[in-house]
Amino acid sequence: MKATIISVGNELLMGKTVNTNLTFIAKGLRTLGIEISKAMCSTDEEESIQGALKETNDELIILTGGLGPTPDDMTKEVVCRYYDLELVLHESSLEAIKETFARANKPMNDSNLKQAYFPKEAIVLKNENGTAPGAIIAKDDKTIVLLPGPPSELRPMLNTVLNYLESRLDIKVYQEGYLVVGIGESAMQERLGDFYDRHPSVNIAPYAGLGEIQYIFTSHDKEGLESALDAFKKQFDDVIVGPYYTPLEERVVELLMMKNQTISFAESCTAGLLAGRLVNVADVSKVFKEAYVLYSNESKIKQLGVNQLIMDKFGAVSDQCVYELAYQLAQRTDSDLTVSISGIAGPSGGTVMKPVGTVYFGVHYDGLTKTYHQVFSGNRQMVRDKAVTYALGLIYDTLTGKHEDKY
């Protein structure tokens, strides 16, 4: 089966909104072995939407956006005119929309009424996070899927769509993979060598993020997939931190919970980003004690007692400073593991010896304090994000004992 994805919205074409829906849908379809032949963006105009529909003969057409209550939200109406489908009131959708407004203690506007109209042939997808239901419509030899634009509304619906599609496909596609941290994509490619050639029945796709890479294995051959996964794990166990779909911060919290240990941070250039990543995880309060954002040199001295002589001689961006921060943090918080970060995120502040992107890390664990440093590329935000991922990798490796072999 081949698919076309049509993303509707002027904001996408103006550069105001990044089209993350396309990536999310593409990954979902990939798990079923569905190939995307086209991806198009359309304005909020009938002629543009119809033009996109004319350009595809694929069996599956997914449209996102344009299901809201305003006049320029016309995706559903245009699709129904194009395929000659009659819109009728879907009573349960109307009730759901009314309930949404009632919970917010607001009156429902007349403009929202159109969101409850669908072709009678449609499978209506309930929207748990908004007022725009989605729909699956079978028309002749095509399946047309309508999904709302906001990712928070679209993403929960996609699981229902994928289940619907899987139940109608004759083939089974298997997918697994790993999350890799602490190594760049080019270095991984060098180490992979002829790995792809040794597993011809498996599609292996790397998706590089900021400091981490997802390796997703897809195949119709279950045994071939398992063989490739086992071989990959043996060859790259030193950089694998878990399944590709489990965020690194979740793995860190899992390990801390298993060990019944606690953690605290002292952040300078990352200014709380590390703590923010960790607290995305449910129940993190069981292991996370506290964090300091110590941006100025004075705050490092005042709050954690870093020696003024260290600051004068070595500076805040140094092994000596992050050592002291991690060590003093452990004494003051009594946490089992403490991490400190200090660096030069840029765009200014770099020197020949310590260029922009230089970040130092201190880790205190099991009575020992160790320091590490990296030079990250990219703009200010990228440097900070990469530093956070690297720190999480350090924590994971420290808790698993892998750090002795890697650093």
Image (cartoon, helix red, strand yellow):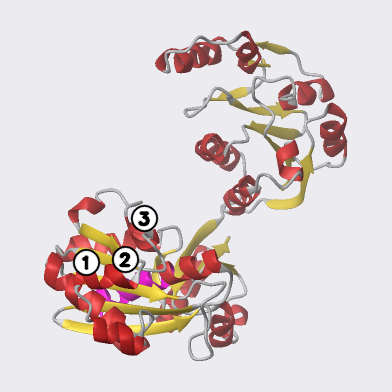
Specify the segment rendered in magenta: 389-401
In the image, what residue occupies the spot 32% across and 85% down? 312
Image spot of residue 314 (x, y percent): 34, 88
Q: Is residue 394 magenta?
A: yes
Rendering quarter of residue 382: bottom right
Look at discs 1 and 3 and give the one toward the viewer. 1
Label for residue 284?
none
Image spot of residue 111 (x, y percent): 65, 12
Q: Is residue 335 magenta?
A: no
- Tell me whether circle 1 and circle 2 mark residues in contact (CB < 8 Å): yes
Between 197 and 369, the one lying in front of the other is 369
User: Which residue is the site of mark 3?
Assistant: 276
SS of the residue under disc 1: helix
Image spot of residue 241 (x, y percent): 38, 70
User: Which residue is the site of mark 2?
Assistant: 294
Tell me which amino acid carries mark 3.
Gly
Tell me which amino acid carries mark 1.
Gln
In the image, what residue occupies the spot 25% across and 75% down? 325
Rendering quarter of residue 274: bottom left
Height in image: 13 above or below 377?
above
User: Which residue is the site of mark 1?
Assistant: 303
